[in-house]
């Protein structure tokens, strides 16, 4: 029997500067949660969040610095669930120099949240948004077999191919698992592929290097199920469907405009990945 976590219906969403964070905040409000969420300093961003249904009654916006441990501790105090949804830094992919400052900031911010959650008595579970790009880039994997949550991307391959977003997500997630295990924190991780808005058309700038897609509202549902269902554990590779060969090649042309179509065709190898685990989770919610 599936048992949901008992909750005080108060949750924190950190890192809401992306499709997942905004969709998650909206879903939590719809579920009756009181929500605290961090945003940037943009008035436009605040206006978008406060326009959500029930926001005036149950949404508190904060400008929180993930690199400030005391700031995070204050933000999560008294809450039962914490969601960390740092948007992937895809704009850095392909740049020649290793973006050490950006990668370090994501890792340090993630570890700050894990540490703060471990030291907060009210926190029942932390849910981290990683990426499918932290799972699938392992060139030693047998291409005839389907990849699932047990896989980890190969950092040497990622660095060689300058897939810096995946480097950040892989290091941050591995670090989070190590610290959570050491501190005894109940951590669950979602690994979404390409996240789209309500319209499933693929949008430039909203990709993580993995040729599979999921709508933001579905990814948000998976996050809430991961927080509420007591048996949820480990990682969840999250996508709704794989792209067709034609869609995948079209996306690759947008991502790599300086590579000839012939070369892209030669390099393209369809992924076989499984979403069975997250499908079971959502079906239970």
Image (tube, rainbow, N blue to C red):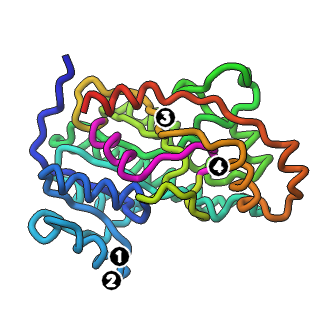
Query: Any mark on residue 209, and which?
Result: 4
From the image, which quarter does the N terminus lie in?
Answer: top left
Q: Please tell me how crowded label 1 is: few (under 14), some (14-19), or many (20+) other residues with Cα within 10 Å.
A: some
Find the magenta span and give its range.
Answer: 208-225
The percent position of residue 89, horizontal first and vertical second, equals 58, 60
Name the residue nearer the viewer: 219 or 120.
Answer: 219
Provide the residue designation for mark 3: 237
The percent position of residue 185, horizontal first and vertical second, equals 31, 33
User: Residue visible at 21% across and 21% down?
Assistant: 2
Spatial separation of the CA atoms under disc 4 and disc 3: 14 Å
Query: First in sequence: mark 3 or mark 1?
Result: 1
Name the residue nearer the viewer: 69 or 272.
Answer: 272
User: Residue visible at 27% across and 58% down?
Assistant: 25
Query: Any mark on residue 235, and which?
Result: none
Spatial separation of the CA atoms under disc 3 and disc 1: 29 Å
User: Residue visible at 60% across and 62% down?
Assistant: 101
Q: In this view, does 156 lie to the left or right of 187?
A: right
Q: Residue furthest bottom?
A: 43
Provide the residue designation for mark 2: 43
Name the residue nearer the viewer: 193 or 187.
Answer: 193
Q: Quadrant of residue 243?
A: top right
């Amino acid at each position: 029997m599936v048992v949901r976590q008992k909750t005080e219906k108060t949750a924190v969403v950190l890192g809401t500067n992306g499709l997942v964070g905004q969709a998650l905040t909206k879903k939590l409000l719809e579920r009756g949660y009181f929500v605290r969420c961090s945003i940037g300093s943009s008035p436009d961003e605040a206006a978008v969040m406060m326009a959500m249904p029930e926001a005036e009654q149950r949404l508190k916006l904060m400008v929180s610095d993930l690199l400030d441990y005391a700031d995070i501790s204050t933000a999560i105090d008294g809450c039962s669930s914490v969601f960390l949804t740092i948007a992937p830094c895809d704009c850095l992919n392909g740049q020649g120099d290793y973006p050490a400052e950006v990668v370090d900031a994501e890792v340090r911010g993630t570890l700050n949240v894990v540490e703060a959650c471990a030291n907060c008595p009210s926190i029942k579970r932390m849910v981290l948004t990683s990426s499918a790009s932290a799972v699938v880039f392992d060139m030693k994997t047998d291409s005839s077999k389907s990849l699932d949550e047990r896989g980890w991307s190969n950092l040497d391959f990622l660095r060689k191919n300058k897939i810096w977003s995946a480097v950040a997500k892989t290091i941050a997630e591995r670090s989070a698992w190590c610290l959570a295990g050491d501190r005894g924190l109940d951590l669950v991780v979602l690994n979404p592929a390409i996240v789209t808005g309500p319209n499933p058309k693929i949008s430039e700038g909203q990709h993580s290097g993995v040729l599979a897609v999921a709508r933001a509202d579905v990814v948000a549902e998976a996050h809430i199920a991961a927080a509420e269902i007591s048996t949820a554990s480990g990682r969840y590779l999250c996508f709704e469907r794989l792209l067709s060969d034609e869609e995948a090649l079209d996306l690759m042309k947008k991502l790599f405009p300086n590579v000839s179509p012939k070369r892209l065709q030669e390099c393209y190898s369809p992924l076989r990945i499984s979403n069975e685990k997250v499908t079971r989770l959502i079906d239970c919610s």
